[in-house]
Image: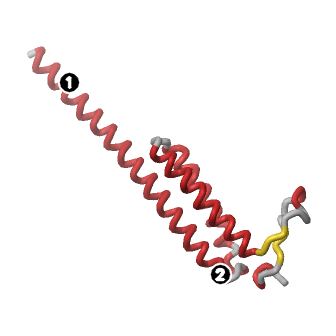
Amino acid sequence: KTPEEGGIFISPFSEFKGMIEITAQQYIGGLSDFTGEIGRYGVAQATARNQDEVRRVLDTMMEIQFYLREMRAILPNKTLKKLFAMGKNIEKMKYLLYEQVLLESRKSMKLSEAEILDEKEEQSENA
């Protein structure tokens, strides 16, 4: 059977050849679950205000999604549900990154406002 018919999927990596045999559906499911796991890591990094790591997680998720969408024509229909779940994970990560960017810009705006107030205070003291 072909992978789209639920046949065996063999890893293209030579060091694993013959060691790992899974169906296409299992492979896609694993990748989708992986995006969920790195999504949890991304949430932890967002909590720590680590924007670079959140962006790296998002980029990884989007790259996996890109390749799976390229293979969509040969994937079993059951895997489309996993692609949808992956898309949801990506949207959550985009939202977290967006929030971080907003917080960062607010922070710099507050700093600018504080600098302006300090400058005005200095001017009134000097007058």
Q: Secondary structure at mark 2?
A: helix
Q: Residue 53: x, y in percent?
A: 55, 45
Specify the label residue 119 is tagged with. Answer: 1
Amino acid type indicated by mark 2: Lys
Could you tell me how far apart the alpha carbons at marks 1 and 2 are, in whole angstroms?
A: 63 Å
* Quarter location, residue 5: bottom right
At a point 38% along the width and 42% down the height, the residue shown is 104
1 or 2: mark nearer the eye: 2
At a point 20% along the width and 25% down the height, the residue shown is 118
Residue at the disc numbered 2: 78
Q: Earlier in the sequence, mark 1 or mark 2?
A: 2
Q: Is residue 91 above or below residue 101?
A: below
- Judge left or right: residue 18 versus residue 74: right
At a point 62% along the width and 56% down the height, the residue shown is 60
* Quarter location, residue 87: bottom right
Asked if disc 1 and disc 2 are in contact, CB closer than 8 Å, the reply is no
Q: Residue 99: x, y in percent?
A: 39, 52
What count of labels does the image hold?
Answer: 2
Q: Secondary structure at mark 1?
A: helix
Q: Residue 65: x, y in percent?
A: 62, 66
Q: Residues within 10 Å of mark 2 (few under 14, many from 20)?
A: few
- Judge left or right: residue 80 versus residue 94: right
The N terminus lies in which quarter of the figure?
Answer: bottom right
Q: Is residue 93 above or below residue 104?
A: below
Q: Name the residue nearer the viewer: 76 or 21.
A: 21
